[in-house]
Image (cartoon, rainbow, N blue to C red):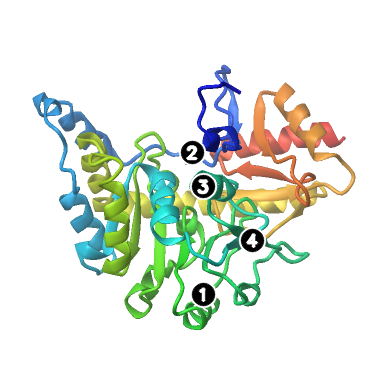
Amino acid sequence: MSKFWSPVVARLTPYVPGEQPKITNLVKLNTNENPYGPSPKVLAALKDAASDHLRLYPDANADDLKATIARYHDLTPAHVFVGNGSDEVLAHAFLALLKHDRPLCFPDISYSFYPVYCGLYDIDYRAVPVDEAYRIDLNDYDDGAGAVIFPNPNAPTGRLLGLADIEALLTRLHDRVVVIDEAYIDFGGDSAIALVRRHPNLLVVQTLSKSRSLAGLRVGFAVGHPELIEALERVKNSFNSYPLDRPAQLGAIAAFEDEAYFQEARAKVIASREWLVEDLKELGFDVLPSAANFVFARHPQRDAGELAAALRQRVIIVRHFKLPRIDQFLRISIGTDAECEALVKALSEILA
């Protein structure tokens, strides 16, 4: 700790992102990146963006990108906010919409960035336990919540909530903001964006990092009632007026315009997930139902940390969370078929 630090910095416990090791021939199944590259149209747009125009500031409002996202979801640009990855969008939402007199509620097993944001912005929060099957019960969020946020599918469990349950919560908490973090929704669920017109208290946050293979470009967005979007814009323009550079805006537009590629890539990931789940079960793993591009699995006879270490010796890395209730689980990203086959082969050898 430095004497020059402010008090808020001294009390922070920063989020720890997934490891990005520089290892040759690594099978990298730890950070939920898409195993298939971006659309060729995205790559062409990025190539065109590498021009003399980079000397100019980008469109601060990203109007063309907002219009593209709005058309895709049959909404208006006033319903759309864009930012430098969904993490930045979420950070703005915490400050703009989720800080109230009553505590913010989110699942106790969930995206571990949420308590970090609460510490940064001095937000009182309550972690609501998931049940014994690691499911979120939205009936547990009615009592005393100032606002609510949760991922759907949840991370790191991969479990999905249906739109009927979500809409019932939105109706019950009609006077409170509900933020749904849909980083993984394209791999098996229906987006709550369909509910935005009916529920002015709903904000849905998505990313282009996962299903559209653009983790390296850093583009996220939120969809909600224009009053919620205005709050995000006020925070953004008090922090960074130019969060999305010119290549990011053009690449993101191209990603939305290549629907065929998007559908093909996500279908391949879903198919790989389904057979990987069956293979893991045959090896004796308990695997939670997943609607994401990862699975959450544990072996009743083997320690998860030891399994992760043994896989690493075979140049395969997965995510192991040393946290209460989930320290015996491995979160395994869905890779290519060849990468998933290498994982199954390695686990077979380790468990033999």
Give coordinates of residue 280: x percent, y percent.
74, 48
Rendered residue at 53%/78% (across/down): 169
Q: Which residue is mark 4?
A: 126
Q: How many marks?
A: 4
Contact, mark 2 vs mark 4 (Cβ under 8 Å): no
Rendered residue at 73%/49% (across/down): 297
Q: Amino acid at mark 2?
A: Pro
Give coordinates of residue 121: x percent, y percent.
49, 48
Q: Which mark is residue 166?
A: 1
Q: In terms of sequence position, does the residue under pointer 3 or pointer 4 come before the other?
A: 3
Q: In terms of sequence position, does the residue under pointer 2 or pointer 4 come before the other?
A: 2
Q: Amino acid at mark 4?
A: Arg
User: Looking at the figure, which quarter contains the C terminus?
Assistant: top right
Q: Which residue is mark 2?
A: 35
Element at badge 4?
strand
Q: Which residue is mark 3?
A: 117
Picture quadrant where residue 80 is located: bottom left
Of 183 and 235, nearer the camera is: 235
Of 54 and 31, nearer the camera is: 54
